[in-house]
């Protein structure tokens, strides 16, 4: 398995594309104007508590107030409020909490009106970015993420990732981390800490404590509201969260960013420094790695898959609905049940990819093709769980219902990635059409079905632009068809055709429907 990170930089935007075996599985964008990223910490003021919602609205500087629910306050809220008040007044300068007198924890099932008042100053952290008409969702249970550990101020718990399977390793890591963690701080041990030595963990911990101290120094002079701790720049935060030993290359087209990333990789994984490469080719980096093509063919309402199957993805205010279709494919399987299972397994892999790629969250309902056998439904369920295992977003998958529906909930912390794939119709009329690259994909899929039906000679009639795209250059698209299927397709340009119109004809000149 090859894992590649391709980074494209422009003056104010950096795009990140994560490829797995050449296939696009994640897209990220870093824009200079995003002031409310997940992980940012603000010094803010309580606008008002709303007992009916058991929540408070907090002014963090966004056009709409942030939402703070009682369950997101954290048990140590009184200690945090006391700390912020004393630091803001300049009466507390020891930010490491070892001499700080903690207050009693709040009641787990208490009321917001009993613990928060209007105009109180509070440190809050963005846990969900502004989405649609809603302001940010925040928490006052703070955490600062590092490479191997997450630092949790005002806590004394040492917890560990459930993905670390070995009981002995869990005990070893807990013992090491407990020995180096200062009083007043808790730690969450991340999956990538498995097998690491105490020196590496301690270095990560010291970096996080330095960030905490630097943040606390800003509180005394900070305006309310204002950001006092930014999440790391996108390049570093993405590498921190997804980078592992399975990465085979990181390619970036900007020299300054290249040096930053190389330094960061050298710090967290010195043996992998050589995989960071500076891209200098004249062809745009996303074109070179086939990412633009994958974006155009992956973000529409209809998503094509192998063997003629396709997905239809619909979005509503409350949920996402995905319909699985087998298409008009030739059936080489023994029966309908085997065909349904094959299409469903292909679709499950693509759905797992689409959820990550579009960063779809909330409730997702998938209408798979009905299967009669319980063992096949179980096989589909297990396959979908395995495919979504690498997904960093918290998610839950329910087994298929009697109607073949699978319900998925997936954590939504950022707005969904929505890329426009339709283009203006060059024939006029003011309407929009599918991108030409999608038409080429459809033509290829139609041809594959015709080849299976054993047509001896096939002629393709298409608009001159499409015909030229298929036949010009080396190797041309038509040459690739020949190399794969050992059948030559005659391509004829037709001036009368609309831009995306095409038809197939057999050796007798009769149209193939």
Image (cartoon, helix red, strand yellow):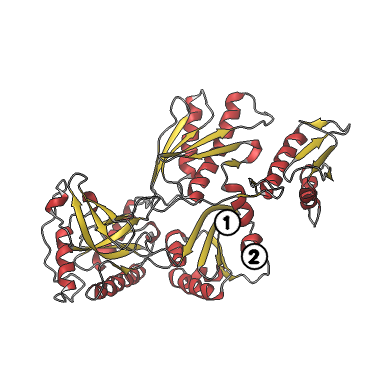
Where residue 509 sits, quadrant-wise, is top right
Which residue is disc 2 drawn over? 284
Q: Residues within 10 Å of mark 1 (few under 14, many from 20)?
A: few
Which residue is disc 1 drawn over? 2
What is the C-alpha distance between the residues marked 1 and 2?
Answer: 22 Å
Residue at disc 1, secondary structure: loop
Q: Is residue 92 left or right of residue 307?
A: left
What residue sits 14% from the left and 53% below the top?
Answer: 106
Q: Nearer the viewer, mark 1 or mark 2?
A: 2
Depth check, front residue: 454 or 31: 31
Residue at disc 2, secondary structure: loop
Where residue 62 sits, quadrant-wise, is bottom left
Q: Where is residue 456 shown, x and y percent of the image?
A: 85, 34
Where residue 171 sits, quadrant-wise, is bottom left
Q: Is residue 132 left or right of residue 64?
A: right
Sequence-first tag of 1 and 2: 1
Q: Is residue 183 left or right of residue 331?
A: left
């Amino acid at each position: 398995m090859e894992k590649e990170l391709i980074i494209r930089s422009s003056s104010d935007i950096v795009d990140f594309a994560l490829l797995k075996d050449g296939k696009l599985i994640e897209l990220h964008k870093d824009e200079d104007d995003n002031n409310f990223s997940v992980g940012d910490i603000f010094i803010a003021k309580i606008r008002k508590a709303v007992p009916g919602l058991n929540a408070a609205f907090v002014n963090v500087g966004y056009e709409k107030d942030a939402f703070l629910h009682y369950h997101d306050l954290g048990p140590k809220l009184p200690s945090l409020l006391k700390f912020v008040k004393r630091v803001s007044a300049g009466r507390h300068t020891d930010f490491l909490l070892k001499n700080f007198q903690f207050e009693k924890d709040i009641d787990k099932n208490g009321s917001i009106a009993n613990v928060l008042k209007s105009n109180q100053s509070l440190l809050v952290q963005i846990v969900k970015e502004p989405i649609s008409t809603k302001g940010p969702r925040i928490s006052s249970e703070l955490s600062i993420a590092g490479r191997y550990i997450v630092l949790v101020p005002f806590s004394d718990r040492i917890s560990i990732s459930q993905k670390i399977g070995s009981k002995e390793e869990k005990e070893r890591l807990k013992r090491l981390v407990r020995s180096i963690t200062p009083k007043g701080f808790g730690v969450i041990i991340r999956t990538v800490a498995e097998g690491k030595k105490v020196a590496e963990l301690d270095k990560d911990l010291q970096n996080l404590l330095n960030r905490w101290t630097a943040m606390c120094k800003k509180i005394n002079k900070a305006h309310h509201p204002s950001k006092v701790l930014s999440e790391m720049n996108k390049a570093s935060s993405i590498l921190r969260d997804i980078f592992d030993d399975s990465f085979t290359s990181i390619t970036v087209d900007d020299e300054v960013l290249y040096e930053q990333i190389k330094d960061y990789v050298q710090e967290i994984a010195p043996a992998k420094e050589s995989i960071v490469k500076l891209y200098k080719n004249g062809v745009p980096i996303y074109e070179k790695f086939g990412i633009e093509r994958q974006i155009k063919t992956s973000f529409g309402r209809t998503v094509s898959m192998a063997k003629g199957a396709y997905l239809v993805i619909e979005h509503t205010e409350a949920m996402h609905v995905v319909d699985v279709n087998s298409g008009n494919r030739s059936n080489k399987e023994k029966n309908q049940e085997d065909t349904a299972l094959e299409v469903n397994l292909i679709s499950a892999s693509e759905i797992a990819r689409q959820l990550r790629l579009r960063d779809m969250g909330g409730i997702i309902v998938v209408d798979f093709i009905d299967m009669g056998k319980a063992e096949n439904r179980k096989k589909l369920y297990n396959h979908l769980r395995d495919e979504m295992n690498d997904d960093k977003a918290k998610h839950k998958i329910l087994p298929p219902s009697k109607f073949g529906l699978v319900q998925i909930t997936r954590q939504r912390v950022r707005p969904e990635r929505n890329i426009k794939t339709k283009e203006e119709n060059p024939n006029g009329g003011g309407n929009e059409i599918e991108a030409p690259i999608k038409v080429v994909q459809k033509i290829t899929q139609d041809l594959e079905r015709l080849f299976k039906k054993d047509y001896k000679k096939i002629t393709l009639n298409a608009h001159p632009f499409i015909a030229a795209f298929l036949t010009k250059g080396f190797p041309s698209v038509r040459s690739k068809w020949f190399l794969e299927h050992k059948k030559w397709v005659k391509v004829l340009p037709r001036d009368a055709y609309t831009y995306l119109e095409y038809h197939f004809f057999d050796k007798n000149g009769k149209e193939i429907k």
